[in-house]
């Protein structure tokens, strides 16, 4: 096994300042530089960020919207098929293909029907009782 000299009288050049310091007073920094102990700078904590898990963005068991929806209007009131499919075209700015380019997206959306002839309403009041005295 090799033996090294103690370096009592040796000098070493600092990587930061370029000055000569005693060999025994030199320390190694986190980035590999050898500097005098008066020039030593510890590693900043922001260079080793803590682990942050990503945020959840989607649902695990998602279902698409259904068009034939039943909506409860009250205790005994039920309306069926009050939503209709409407095709909408949306123009939006898209800089990817060319600067200043617009693209049109066509989407099917559900909107309440204003003049729906298929609306069925069912209601019940009960049996009235008349008392004459």
Image (cartoon, grey):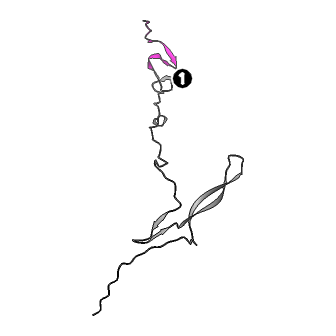
For residue 19: magenta?
yes
**Whole-percent x, y for residue 97 in the image:** 70, 46
20 or 2: which is nearer to us? 2
State the SS at label 1: loop
Q: Quadrant of the C terminus?
A: bottom left
Q: Quadrant of the N terminus?
A: top left
- Residue assigned mark 1: 15
At horizontal 40% and vertical 76% (from top left) the residue drawn is 124
40 or 107: which is nearer to us? 107
Residue situated furthest bottom in the rendering: 133
At horizontal 47% and vertical 34% (from top left) the residue drawn is 48
At horizontal 34% and vertical 83% (from top left) the residue drawn is 128
Q: Residues within 10 Å of mark 1 (few under 14, many from 20)?
A: some
Q: Is residue 25 left or right of residue 133?
A: right
**Whole-percent x, y for residue 37 in the image:** 45, 25
Number of numbered discs overlaid on the protein picture:
1
Q: Is residue 48 above or below residue 17?
A: below
Q: Which residues are magenta?
A: 1-25
**Whole-percent x, y for residue 6 in the image:** 43, 11
Q: Is residue 92 left or right of residue 30?
A: right
Q: Is residue 110 above or below residue 54?
A: below
129 or 55: which is nearer to us? 129
Q: Is residue 81 above or below residue 105?
A: below
**Which quadrant holds residue 16?**
top right
**Whole-percent x, y for residue 24 in the image:** 44, 17
At horizontal 54% and vertical 25% (from top left) the residue drawn is 17
Q: Main secondary structure of the magenta part?
A: loop
């Amino acid at each position: 096994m090799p033996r090294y000299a103690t370096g009592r009288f040796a000098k070493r050049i600092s990587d930061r300042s370029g000055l000569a310091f005693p060999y025994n007073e030199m320390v190694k920094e986190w980035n590999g530089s050898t500097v005098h102990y008066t020039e030593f700078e510890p590693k900043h904590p922001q260079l080793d960020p803590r682990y942050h898990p990503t945020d959840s963005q989607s649902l695990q068991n998602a279902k698409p919207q259904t068009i034939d929806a039943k909506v409860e209007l009250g205790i005994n009131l039920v309306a069926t098929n009050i939503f209709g499919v409407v095709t909408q075209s949306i123009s939006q700015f898209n800089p990817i293909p060319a600067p200043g380019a617009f693209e049109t997206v066509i989407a099917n959306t559900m909107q309440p029907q204003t003049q729906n002839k298929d609306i069925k309403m069912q209601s019940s009041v009960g049996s009235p009782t008349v008392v004459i005295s």
